Image: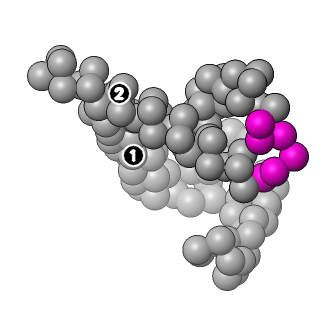
Amino acid sequence: MKTETKDVFSQKKRVAEASYEVFDALQEAVETLGEEKVLELVNAQHKTNAMNAARALASAKPSKRNLEAQATARITAEEFMQVAGDSARIRTLLDKKIKEIEAEMAAKKAEEE
């Protein structure tokens, strides 16, 4: 077992530091935390994973990173040359492409309903 420490952020500001054990084996976790606590933690994480999976399927909305990757892939060479070197114009172009993608997704969802 080892202890790790991570910074804790709230609204993009570091507000604290959290330390926690990283167990090498399930038995080590049981010996340290007790069987009841380990079972509680496993069930809580399992529930969270199931809810996150259901949420992802229901919303069918890609992550911000995924949307930005899709938007970047849609930028033509001509568009790129027009905004190259200007971060504000690049951001504006990406936002425009993201809105196009989101509109397409909304239209597709409306079709399916």
Q: Which residue is mark 1?
A: 48
Q: Is residue 5 left or right of residue 41?
A: right
Q: Residue at x 87, y 46 (%)?
A: 85
Q: Which residue is mark 2?
A: 105
Q: Residues within 10 Å of mark 2 (few under 14, many from 20)?
A: some
The quadrant in which residue 50 appears is top left
Give x and y (percent) for residue 105. Answer: 35, 27
Give x and y (percent) for residue 48. Answer: 39, 46
Q: Is residue 98 left or right of residue 44?
A: right
Above or below for 31 versus 109: below
The quadrant in which residue 6 appears is bottom right
Looking at the image, which is closer to me, 92 or 61?
Answer: 92
Q: Residues within 10 Å of mark 1 (few under 14, many from 20)?
A: few
The quadrant in which residue 43 appears is top left
Identify the image quadrant of the C terminus.
Answer: top left
Magenta stretch in the rendered image: 82-87
Residue 95 part of the magenta-drawn span? no
Give x and y (percent) for residue 37. Answer: 46, 58
Disc 2 residue type (three-letter): Met
